[in-house]
Each structure stands twice: as C-alpha cells, then as structure tokens.
Image: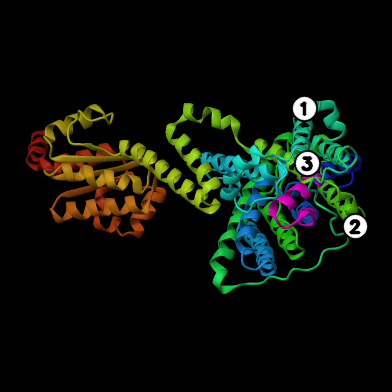
Amino acid sequence: MQLVNRLHFRNLRGDVFGGVTAAIVALPLALAFGVSSGVGPIAGLYGAIVTGFFAALCGGTPSQISGPTGPMTVVMATIFTAVAASDSEAGLATAFTIIMLGGLFQILFGVLRLGKYITLMPYTVISGFMSGIGAIIIIIEIAPFLGYPNVSGVLASFRAIPREIAHPDIMATGLGLLTLAIVFLSPAKLNRIVPSPLLALIVGTLVSVYAMPNGDVPNIGAIPSGLPSLHLPTFNLEKLDFIVGYGLMLAVLGAIDSLLTSLVADNITRTQHDSDRELIGQGIGNTISGLLGGLPGAGATMRTVINVQAGGKTPLSGIIHALILLAIVLGAGSLTANIPHAVLAGILIKVGIDIIDWGFLKRAHLVSWKATGIMYGVMLLTVFVDLIVAVAVGVFVANILTIERLSKLQSEKVQIVTDPKGEIPLEPEETTILREAMGGILLLHLGGPMSFGAAKSISQRMSIVKHYEVLILDITDVTLLGVTASLAVETMVKDAIAKRREVYLVGATGQAKDRLNKLKVLGMIPVQNQLDNRIEALRQADIFLHPATVDNKEKANV
C-alpha cells in the first residue's frame, strides 16, 4: 500500500495552484473558527495546518482539504465552555485531550473498517443537526457582529440578542454589514481571483484601521508566532464520562463531515475515495492537532471544491495548503492584530447560513410530516439542549419509525391460508386440496426478509386459527430469517407438535435453513416432511387427512 494515497508529481502545477488557493480561503476561516471556539485564533490556524497536512498525507481522498469546520467548532466551543468554567488552564488541557481522544476514535473506526457505515445515519437527522449547527453559529456570532464580547453558551447568547440589537456598536455593526455585503455580493469572476472571505477580511481590516482609527472597534490582537507547544493528555476521573462522550461525538461528527465531503470530491473528480483510510488520516490529524494545541478538523467542502476547481488533484495540494498556513504563522502573526471581531463574525454568519439545509427545510413537509418532525426536533435539540442528545434522540426516533414501516411491510408477507380464497396465488391442484381439506390444512406462507418486525405478526395470526390438523410452513420466498422471527417459527412448530399436528416445512434453503438448523427446529420435523415444493407438501397433507380415500383409489387402480 502506498504511504501517501495516489501521490504523484504529474499534476504539480495544478496542485500548487490548488494548495495556494485553498490556503487563501482557509486563512480567514481558521482565524474565525479559532476565535469562535473560545480557544483563540492561533488554535484555529494550528488546527488547519496539522489536520490539513496529516489528513492529506495519510487520508483516502486525494483532493480533499481538511481543517476546522463549523460543526466541529461548535462542538469545541461547547466543550471549552463546559470544562473551562471552573479552571481555565485545566479546562483547556481537558479540551485538547478530548480532541486527541476523538482522533484516536477515528483511527479505530478506520482500522475496524467502519467507514461505509458512518454515513448511514438518516438524512433527516443529519439535516436537522447541520441546520442546528448553522443556527448556533449565527446565534453566537450576533454579539461580536454588533460590537459586543462573545457570550458564553448558546442560550445566553440567544437571550442577549434583543439587548444587543437595541443598542448596537455602530462602527462594529457597519464593519459586519460590509463583510456580509462582500461575501454575499462578490462577483463570481472576482471570487475566482480573490475568494470573498479573504477579500472581506482585507477590506474590513483596512477600513477599520484607516477609516476608524479612533473607533475602538474590538479586534483579535496579534497571534503568537512560532511553533506550538505540546499539550500532553490529562484525564480527570470525575469527568471521564464527559471526556469519552464528547471525544466520541467529535469522532463521529468529524467522520460524517469528512466522508460526505469525500463523496462531493468523488463527484467532481470522477474518482473513488477510500473511506477507511480517510478516517485513519483524519484521526491522525486530529490526534496530533490536539497534542499541539489546535482545533479539531474534518474534510471542508468549500475548500475542497475550490482546490479541485483551481487544479488540485493529489494529496500534494493539501500538503501545500498546510505549509503555506505554517509559513504565515511563523512569519506574519503580527499582521492579524487589527482584524476586527465584527469582520470575522460576518464571515462566520455567512458560513452558518450556508450550513443550514435550506433546500430540505423548504421541502421536508412535502415528503413526510414524520420526517419533518424529526428534522425540526433534532434542530431544536441541537440549538437549545445538547448536541449529543439531539443526535441520539433523532437516530432513535428515526430508527423506531423505520422499524415500524418495515414491520408493516413484513407483516403483509405473513399470510395464513386455510381455504383457497387467500391472497397467495395457487395452482388448480393446490386449490382443490385446500377446498377438500375444509380447514384441516393450515398453510403459513412467509416471504422476503423476516426480522423481529415479522415475529409479532406470525404469533398474532397463528393465535387466530385454533382448529387445524396439518401445518405447512412455506419459507420458499424468505430471503433472510432473523433470530426473533426464527424463534417465533420455533414456538409455532413446538405448539403444533404438542397438539399432535402434522408439520411440513417447505423450501428451507440457505441462511433460513442454517438458522433453523442451529436452533434445532429442523430436528423437530421428520426428514420426510422437509420438502422442496409446496404442492408435494399439500399432497402428503391430503394423504394424511384422507388415508381411506387414498386406499380406495389404489384398490380401484388395481
């Protein structure tokens, strides 16, 4: 296996242009995410450098650009707010430990080859969660946008909005509005030359410095230059459940974010990513990022698309993007001193608006009211309760509703036939035998996948029919027999045998036969009663019910 996935130098010019362009776009976003997280702008830059470098070097999506993203930053802000309340220094160490643990979880996901399962989460949950994340970003950025300090916590930020809107800082708000105008209204041709977030950052800072020299607009100040220091992991047993819970949350969210971006990269490059390798690369990046005091990162859709559009095709573009950001950190930290918070807030409000799933929000009610309820429920829980609770509740409710729908579909495949007027299409001979049996034959036909959703239906329908002499269990059309459904079949066979009924099993093959054999159900039924087709079972059942008639026919033939 190659050390670096699909790395070559045949596209050097395109990779250089892609890496440079991605770095230009990443710079203002990394600064803004760092400030928004509460850890500081340098943490955003370190996160972009480390995750961008190692995810490209070790990942499975050649053209992907990784770094801090909106969803990951919101989770990080929640973590930092929670752990820094009592002791900021110890809290910061705990926060970086959670980032490292999240990275280790992602590596484990990749090693266990769970990549293909990560994105199986219901879209309604993903949509509601992402829209909630977008709403959180907008809510917490209202304060700096209007010239106020960041408020700790989403609810506190939400409550403060009316007061902040009533008494805004005019100069800061003017810079914020200018930023929004640039990021929303920049012409596409200009955007290709200078990405709108960078243009807004430059213009907003220049206006602040030269047009508002005495405006006292809050700015981020100079960021430290030089290499980062190590942040060794620390574990507080009292907070172990919190650390593990949020570490897993970061891992899963980062995995979803990255693999969805990988799918976007596949679509525009006509390539195929390696999801498990991508998880390992993201995990390595996040583990080292936490160790060096950086924010957690994930595959960034906008930066990846821009990289590809500029010509980036191999991991070299992601590596170049990270090295350019490193050069900026090493030599240009003082240039950030005059960047206003309001400008960064304007950039992030645009990010928040883009994250909200407007397309599905507008159409969800046309698809399903249940889906709409799940999506809005997850979104509200994300914003006003807790990120982990939102995802857990959303997945649980979505799965329950899915199980309910599948159970109904499976129940329709459980058909009890005691006379030829049932829903199963019957051959003329089968119809004759069932008619002459006059309810003495109970034909149970199962079809399709039979999971625990079908077990209840099997039991209910069997309880309705009390009087029969022969049970024919037809599983010819069963593609999958789950454990619970198998146990329901076992109970039915045991009950029939206890009542001295004759039992026939038809069409037991493959997985269904193997499952029934392991449960020793096949051993309860005589070998001669285990048949390949239904008509033969019905003929034997007819002989069992009418032995005298058969004897008379044989004598007549003699």
Dot 1 lies on which element? helix
Do the numbered discs 3 and 2 sit on residues whose CB atoms are within 8 Å?
no
Residue 25, percent across and down?
81, 41
**Which of the image's four quarters has the N terminus?**
bottom right
* Mark pair 2, 1: CA separation: 33 Å
Which residues lie in the magenta part? 27-45
- Say whether residue 263 is left or right of residue 525: right
**Residue picked out by circle 2:** 330
Question: Toward the viewer: 101 or 96?
Answer: 96
- The quadrant where residue 87 appears: bottom right
Question: Toward the viewer: 473 or 213?
Answer: 213
Residue 24, percent across and down?
85, 42
Tell me the kind of residue under disc 1. Answer: Leu
* Mark pair 3, 1: CA separation: 15 Å
**Residue picked out by circle 1:** 185
* Disc nearest the viewer among 3 and 2: 3
**Residue picked out by circle 3:** 343
Q: Residue at x 83, y 38 (%)?
A: 204
Tell me the kind of residue under disc 3. Answer: Val
Is 42 a magenta residue? yes
